[in-house]
């Protein structure tokens, strides 16, 4: 009964989130101009363009199936079957939304525009030489300056597509397939993490929301979905390491964390989430502190390799900050984006997540206030699991807020923050009546994808 009594408060949280989005739209359209914000449909990068396409029937069908059957299937399917099922459902959702814009526009052409990675593949004939010279082309006025996304990321991002090209999977089509296939595994990584740290019950409740997130609109149109998945698996392996006390999981986690830092500079902030995982699994770490050795050794592999070749991460980041403010960031007003970015987060995580975050906050408040006592009974155990999940979500929210106030994310956070937003979605496990909230999530995604031509 207590869960149902909180439903009106959940609606208040959802309405507040919707009002935040409405304010960002209205202020962006009527207070600022395009030359101020440099986005076509503030707060999102895109333009108003109602349309349908080949993926529309499939998207509606996947949405309906997730709403009607998702909670029951997630509750009853054996765990080992649930993980591939979630991956498959996530891919179906991302693919169908991407194909609303057709194959060429929705998938094959996304990473071939002038700002993207594939435009420089032919410049990477000698990979070590390019890495040594990478920083010389970051600034806008440097000779043969890199396109925006190449300059804006460490070289592992572009190198991914260079290596795909080298093994015969070149071109925008294969790049799109790679990003969607890899990006869809992110939901599996989060499920693995939640189960390891907060129990299988909450992981199962979160599964349909991870599959049906509106973030799928951008997972299918940018490389950031792929970055989010790599980062999510780094966290998942760390959770398995500290709960199962496995040296191999620890080494794998460190290796992926190192790779994450060379895919996107901003993903170093995920150290906050990693710290939360270590705290939640502190018993495992205390019993086997040797876990930190392979973790740190694995994390050092990528930095050591890139540094040995001649790429200086810190120098590249310093130059990126200069280029960032030479471009659009020097124009876009911090006073708008510092809160409009949060409206973008509402659009990629949905109104259900706003309600879920309210409940997660309530769990932590009751815990800090002494309303939840430690014990060994099933009720106490369930409450302990909820506290652990709420703590993990709170760490992700703190990470996102740190990215926001840094000023290094003015606009385009609907794709840039995918690696952070992914960890807010498990808060939906706290919600009763999941089908109603799932309907709200899928309808939002369908509206965004069919009413707007997104920039990524």
Image: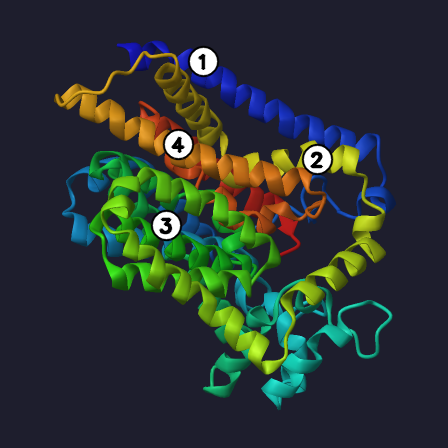
Marking on residue 202: none
Q: Which residue carries the number 2 mark?
A: 338
Marking on residue 391: 4
Q: What's the CA distance linking mark 4 and mark 3?
A: 19 Å
Task: Kindly identify the residue that appears in the image at 87 percent across and 46 percent down.
Answer: 35
Q: How crowded is mark 1: few (under 14 residues within 10 Å), some or many (20 or more)?
A: some
Residue 215 showing in the rendered view: no
* Residue 69 in the figure: left or right of residue 133: left
Q: Which of the two discs, 1 and 2, labels the residue nearer the N terminus?
A: 1
Q: What's the CA distance linking mark 4 and mark 1?
A: 21 Å
Task: Kindly identify the residue that appears in the image at 30 percent across and 27 percent down.
Answer: 386
Query: Residue 150: image x %, image y %?
Result: 67, 69
Q: What's the CA distance linking mark 1 and mark 2?
A: 26 Å
SS for callout 4:
helix
SS for callout 3:
helix
Query: Count of labels shown?
Result: 4
Q: Which residue carries the number 1 mark?
A: 9
* Residue 12 in the figure: left or right of residue 428: right
Query: Is 244 placed above or below 318 here?
Result: above
Marking on residue 187: 3
SS for callout 2:
helix
Q: Which of the two discs, 3 and 1, labels the residue nearer the N terminus?
A: 1
Residue 439 showing in the rendered view: yes
Mark closer to the observer (2, 3): 2
């Amino acid at each position: 009964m207590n869960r149902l009594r909180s439903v009106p408060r959940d609606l208040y949280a959802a309405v507040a989130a919707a009002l935040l989005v409405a304010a960002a739209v209205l202020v962006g359209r009527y207070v600022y101009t395009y030359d101020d914000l440099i986005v076509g449909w503030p707060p999102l990068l895109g333009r108003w363009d109602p349309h349908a396409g080949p993926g529309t029937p499939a998207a509606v069908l996947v949405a309906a199936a997730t709403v009607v059957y998702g909670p029951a299937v997630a509750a009853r399917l054996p765990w080992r079957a649930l993980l591939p099922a979630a991956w498959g459902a996530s891919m179906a959702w991302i693919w169908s939304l991407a194909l609303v814009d057709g194959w060429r526009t929705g998938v094959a052409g996304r990473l071939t525009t002038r700002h993207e990675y594939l435009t420089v593949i032919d410049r990477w004939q000698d990979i070590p030489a390019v890495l040594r010279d990478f920083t010389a082309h970051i600034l806008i006025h440097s000779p043969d300056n890199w396109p925006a996304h190449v300059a804006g990321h460490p070289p592992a991002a572009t190198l991914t597509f260079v290596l795909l090209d080298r093994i015969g999977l070149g071109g925008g089509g294969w790049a799109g397939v790679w990003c969607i296939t890899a990006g869809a595994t992110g939901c599996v990584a989060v499920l693995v993490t939640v189960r390891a740290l907060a129990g299988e019950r909450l992981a199962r409740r979160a599964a349909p929301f991870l599959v049906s997130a509106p973030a799928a609109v951008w997972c299918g149109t940018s490389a950031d979905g792929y970055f989010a998945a790599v980062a999510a698996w780094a966290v998942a392996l760390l959770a398995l390491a500290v709960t199962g006390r496995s040296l191999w999981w620890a080494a794998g986690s460190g290796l992926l964390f190192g790779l994450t830092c060379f895919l996107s500079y901003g993903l170093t902030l995920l150290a906050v989430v990693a710290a939360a995982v270590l705290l939640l699994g502190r018993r495992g770490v205390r019993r086997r502190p040797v876990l930190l050795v392979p973790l740190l050794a694995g994390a050092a592999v990528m930095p050591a390799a890139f540094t040995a070749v001649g790429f200086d991460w810190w120098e590249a980041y310093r130059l990126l900050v200069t280029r960032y403010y030479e471009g659009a960031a020097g124009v876009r007003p911090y006073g708008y984006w510092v809160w409009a970015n949060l409206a973008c987060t509402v659009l990629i995580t949905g109104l259900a997540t706003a309600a879920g975050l309210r409940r997660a906050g309530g769990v932590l408040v009751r815990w800090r206030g002494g309303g939840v006592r430690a014990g060994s009974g099933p009720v106490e155990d369930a409450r302990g699991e909820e506290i652990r999940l709420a703590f993990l979500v709170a760490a992700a929210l703190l990470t996102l807020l740190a990215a926001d106030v840094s000023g290094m994310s003015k606009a385009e956070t609907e794709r840039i923050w995918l690696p952070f937003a992914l960890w807010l979605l498990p808060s939906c496990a706290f919600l009763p009546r999941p089908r109603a909230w799932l309907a709200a999530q899928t309808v939002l995604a369908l509206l965004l994808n069919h009413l707007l031509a997104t920039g990524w």
